[in-house]
Amino acid sequence: MQKQIRLLSVLSIAVLNLFLGIGYASAQTQTAQPVKPAIVTTNKTDKNPNESKGDYSSAPSDLAGRLVRPPLIEPEVDPTLNHEVFEDFLNGSNYTPLEKINQLAYAGGGTGQGWGYSAAYEDAWGVIEARHGTGSNSRLDLVGKTPNMHYVAIGMGTAYEYQVRFNFANLSTPTDRYVTFDGFFDGDNTDPEFDRGILFRYSDDINEGRFQVVIRQGPGVETLIDTGIAPVVDTWYRFKVTVNATGTEALFFVDGELVATATDLAVGAANRYTAESNNDRLSGTTSFVSRRFDYVRFRATSGRASRL
C-alpha cells in the first residue's frame, strides 16, 4: 500500500512537471524576441550618397577635423586689372593721406568756397558738394590722382575708364555761370582752358544747356557731339568714359546708355591726361553750390577697354 502511494506521488509530480513545462514553453513562444540589428557592409567603391551636392572627399579639414568645403562658385577675377581707385565719400571731403582720391582741389578764392558734406540720400550715403565762394573764378575740381599716379597716356597698351555719379544743386545761369568737365582732361592750362580732352561738358550757354561730348586733340582741333540730354536739378546722373588699350576708340555712357563714340584721340606719351570732374565758375560773385558727388571711379586695365 505504501509502495502504491509512493508511486502515485512520483507520477503526480512527473505529470505536474510535464504540464508546467508545456505551459512555460507555450509562454516562451508567445513572448516577442528582441530583433538583432542588421549588419550592413559598405563597399568602399560605392558612390558618395551626397554626390549630388558636390564631392568633398578630397577637401581639407580644419584643426578640429571638420570638413572644410571649397566654395561652390569660384570668385570672378579680372587678370587684366592693374589699378582701381574708387571713392564714395563716406568719410566726407576732408583730405587724409589714406584718401583714395588724392586731390579735392579748389582755387579762385572768395568767401564760402570749398568742398563740404551734403545731406545723405536714400540711394547715396556718402555725398560731398562743390561750394563756390564769392570769387569770380571759383573753381572746385575732383582730380583722379593718387600719391604715385599723376597722369596717364593713352594708346600705349592700357585701357582706362573714368566714372562719376552726381546731381546738380543749381544749374548754370547767366548770373552765376559755370562750366563742368567730366572725363580725361589735360593739365597744360589753367582751368577751364585745356588743350586735350576726352570728356563730357556742360554749361547753360554751351549746346543750348545740354550735355555735350568733347574730343579735343589740340587747340582748335576737336569733335563735338550733342547727347540730347538736358540736366535737371536734384536728378542723379552717372557718366562713364572708356578708352581702349590702343587709343583708337573712346565710348561715352550716361546712366549705362551709350551716347557717343569717338576715334580721333590724341595718343602717346607726349599727350598726358588726368581723370577729373571740374566745376569752374565763369561769372557772378554769389555763394552757391553747383554739384553734389556720390562717387568717382578710375580703372586701368591691360589689353581691353573696361565696359562694366
Image (cartoon, rainbow, N blue to C red):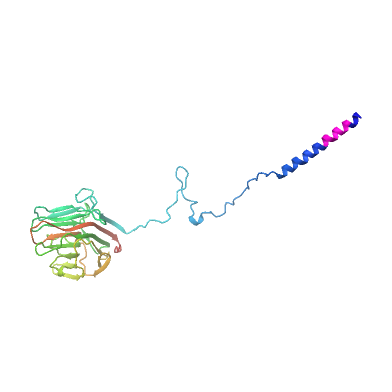
Look at 17% across and 65% down and name the residue there: 201
Look at 75% across and 42% down and name the residue there: 25
Q: Is residue 259 above or below residue 79?
A: below
Outermost residue, right direction?
Answer: 1
Expressed as whole percent of the image width and height from the top left, the position of residue 292 reads: 19, 57
Residue 114 forms part of the magenta stretch: no
In terms of depth relative to the viewer, which is nearer, 191 or 4?
4
Expressed as whole percent of the image width and height from the top left, the position of residue 78 reads: 34, 58
Based on the displayed image, in which of its 4 quarters is residue 242 positioned? bottom left
Residue 103 visible somewhere in the drawing: yes
Look at 16% across and 54% down and name the residue there: 105
Look at 23% across and 56% down and name the residue there: 294
Based on the displayed image, in which of its 4 quarters is residue 246 positioned? bottom left
Name the magenta segment's main secondary structure: helix
Q: Quadrant of the N terminus?
A: top right
Expressed as whole percent of the image width and height from the top left, the position of residue 231 reads: 19, 65
| Left or right side of 77 for 18 | right
Expressed as whole percent of the image width and height from the top left, the position of residue 217 reads: 18, 67
Q: Start and end of the magenta stretch?
A: 5-14
